Every structure is written in C-alpha cells, then in structure tokens.
Image (cartoon, grey):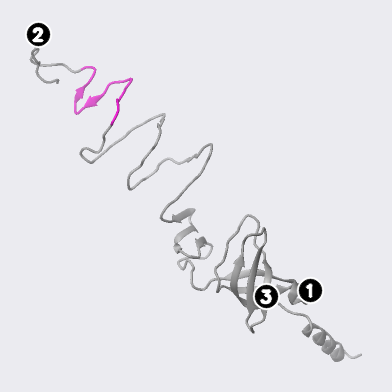
C-alpha cells in the first residue's frame, strides 16, 4: 500500500469520528453534583442531559444563549461533555494583560471581583456579606472608610486615637468611662480649677 493510499485511509477513518464542535446553550439543570445541560450544535443537532464539566472549587450556573464547546468522547455524540462556555454579552472589558475577573452574568461588572496588576483587588457590588463564625482578621496599617460604620456590639482597641473634623460628629447614648484624664478644649476634667468659688447652694463660675 502506497503512502498516499495510507493517508487516504486514515483520513476516511477520521471522518467517521466526531470531532469537538461548537453549539448554543438552551438551559441548565444544576440540581446534581455534575450539571447537565440542554443545547444544540450549530447545525441544530440536539444535546440533552449533557454533562458540563467545571474546575474543582468553582461552580457557576450559566445563562441560556451561551456559546459552548462540545466534545464527543470516543467520537460518539451520546458520550458528549461540555468543556467550555463564553458569554459575549456580559463581560469585564477593562482588563489589562495578566488581570483576572469573576462576575455575575446577570449583573455583569456591577457585581464583580477583579484582581488588578499591582496587587490590587477590586470588589464591586451593592451589598457585601462576610460570614465568619470565629474571626475576621485584617492585617493592615490603615483602613479608610468614606461613610458611616455601625457596630452592633462592643469594640476593643489596644491604642485608640480619633479625630473628627465635623461639628457634633460624636454622640454617646450611654455612659462614658475613662481611666485617664478627659480634656475638652484646653480644660482638664481631673485637673481644672474653678473660678469664683462660693459657699452653700450658690453656683461657682466656670472651670478653667
């Protein structure tokens, strides 16, 4: 058998084996450990209850209409699996080479986590919930907040320094206790002197 005949025989054999193909996602069944999808190939071939393989530790339920890649295992359509998807309508556009984004297909960039170059992590959302049953630990020299901080229970600090530039910004509904002195303006609570001292039930002048 000549080399050309061998090549023709191999090509003919390969034509009988299904190759990877593209398709369009219709819907997803996410009730099982491995998701099953309903989709169709670009030529209209149906794929029902086809497993959708994802990376361990990551799970997403894609929307219908996504472009998908279908791999018929052993060349058989009945043994197909979906290995990749792409949503051309929702994506984070302003990514530089090397940057990574995780986002919700419904909300897009408005609900996303972006790992920027330069060791910057950006979280964008309306509500951020962190559930830690034991501890949340932040090791940083500085925390900046642009708006209010509400704490339901007590706070403990090893060293506390507070500066407010807004008049009437601090209000305490309960008692305030201090082991050290309290200074209001230039007047010490422990060491101030009272002017115009009088006897009996009359009032003295203000402190200084």
Residue at the spot 52% in from the left edge and 41% down from the top edge:
132
Residue at the spot 23% in from the left edge and 41% down from the top edge:
166
Q: Is residue 126 left or right of residue 203?
A: right
Mark 2 to mark 3 CA distance (whole Å) = 98 Å
**First-in-chain label (2 vs 3):** 3
> Where is residue 66 shown, x and y percent of the image?
56, 73
| Label 2 neighbour load within 10 Å: few <14, some 14-19, many 20+ | few
The region drawn magenta spans: 173-191
Residue at the spot 66% in from the left edge and 59% down from the top edge:
32
Q: Secondary structure at mark 2?
A: loop
The image quadrant where one finds the C terminus is top left
Q: Which residue is mark 3?
A: 47
Question: Between tags 2 and 3, which lies in front?
Answer: 3
> Where is residue 159 shown, x and y percent of the image?
39, 30
Q: Which residue is mark 1?
A: 74
**First-in-chain label (3 vs 1):** 3
Image position of 199 with respect to 60: above or below? above
Magenta segment, prevailing SS (helix, strand or loop): loop
Q: Which residue is mark 2?
A: 200
Q: Is residue 68 left or right of residue 97?
A: right
- Asked whether the residues under the numbered discs 2 and 3 touch, taking CB atoms below 8 Å apart as contact, a structural biologist would say no
Mark 2 to mark 1 CA distance (whole Å) = 105 Å
């Amino acid at each position: 058998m000549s080399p050309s005949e061998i090549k023709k025989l191999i090509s003919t054999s390969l034509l009988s084996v299904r190759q990877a193909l593209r398709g369009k996602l219709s819907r997803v069944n996410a009730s099982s450990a491995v998701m099953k999808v309903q989709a169709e190939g670009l030529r209209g071939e149906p794929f029902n209850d086809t497993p959708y393989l994802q990376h361990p530790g990551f799970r997403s339920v894609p929307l219908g209409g996504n472009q998908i890649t279908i791999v018929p295992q052993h060349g058989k359509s009945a043994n197909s699996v979906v290995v990749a998807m792409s949503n051309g309508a929702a994506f984070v556009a302003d990514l530089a080479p090397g940057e990574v984004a995780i986002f919700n297909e419904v909300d897009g960039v408005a609900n996303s986590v972006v790992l920027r170059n330069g060791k910057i992590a950006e979280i964008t959302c309306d509500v951020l919930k962190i559930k830690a049953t034991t501890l949340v630990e932040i090791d940083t020299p500085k925390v900046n907040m642009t708006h209010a901080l509400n704490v339901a229970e007590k706070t403990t600090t090893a060293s506390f320094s507070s500066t407010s530039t807004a008049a009437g910004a601090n209000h305490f509904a309960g008692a305030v206790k201090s082991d050290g002195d309290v200074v209001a303006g230039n007047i010490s609570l422990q060491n101030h002197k009272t002017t115009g001292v009088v006897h009996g039930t009359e009032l003295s002048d203000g402190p200084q």
